[in-house]
Amino acid sequence: MRNPIIAALDVPSAEQALALAEQIAPAVGAFKIGKELFVAAGPDIVRRVRATGAPVFLDLKFHDIPNTVAKAVASAVRLDVQMLTLHASGGSEMMRAAEKAAQDTAKMLGRPVPLVLGVTVLTSSNRETLAEIGCDVDPEQQVLRLARLAAASGLRGLVCSPLEIVALRKILPTEIQLVTPGIRTGSEKADDQKRTLTPREAMEAGASWLVIGRPIYAAENPRAAAEKILESLS
Ligand code: C5P
């Protein structure tokens, strides 16, 4: 079985990210680089993490006109990332352009096509947040609507909350990969994640990959924490 743990390198500098990556690499399946680290350390941090041999998930959540998103995706493929994100609310034309750019650029470079993941509704949004921007629907309905749109636009994966996995599995083609943050083991301090599952529960519900940040990087011993999570999955 492949290791489904994606460790979020949610730290502010390249040095901290590389030290963390080196420490936990044997116990995780991939690393996620998000906005905090990317804006601080630039594309070079992607190259340096890739140089360790581990797959990289570039979580920059693109949302722009289709041409701009397509070009950003092409740049990400040239950086040799294995997963990247965009907002499904950018619409089908934007998502099709992104998927096409991923396919075409990977083909040109002779590399596997990275997984372009659609983000539906951010877990920080609720009914009021959606109403505020003119979307008078339940967040759950909007998640399903955007998930269907992403799949119909050719995306092969989605980011979702652990509590959305079961509903999404019912409506999506089985080959769609679901990447799930909001994972807690129960032994860490309470923080801002409110709707969580354990790693094992999320995998049993149908997650393909687990994005895990604080339960690993904020643990006293990040390597031991990652190993324990991996063991809990076997
Ligand atoms: O520390 P924690 O395990 O909560 O980290 C989860 C990671 O997943 C963070 O990088 C966070 O930005 C990201 N994420 C999330 N919830 C979402 C989407 C992304 O926690 N809905």
Image: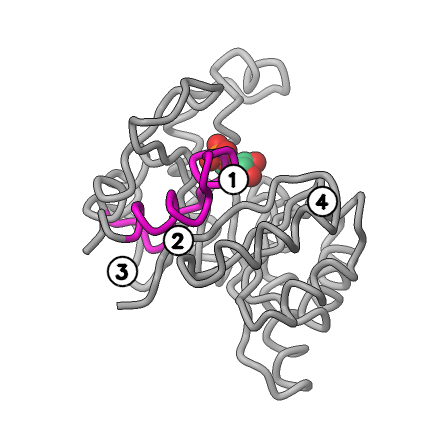
Secondary element under disc 4, as helix, strand or loop, is: helix
Secondary element under disc 1, as helix, strand or loop, is: helix
Q: Is residue 13 left or right of residue 234?
A: right
Residue 49 image point, x, y percent: 64, 63
Amino acid at dot 4: Leu
Contact between marks 4 and 3 (CB within 8 A): the answer is no
Compute the Cα span from label 1 to label 2.
13 Å
Q: Is label 1 or label 3 in front? A: 1
Q: Which residue is mark 2?
A: 5
Residue 131 image point, x, y percent: 56, 15
Amino acid at dot 2: Ile
Q: Which residue is mark 1?
A: 217
Residue 167 image point, x, y percent: 26, 38
Q: Which residue is mark 3?
A: 174
* 190 relative to 169, above or below: above
Amino acid at dot 1: Tyr
Regarding residue 24, the answer to whether it shows in the image is yes
Contact between marks 1 and 2 (CB within 8 A): the answer is no
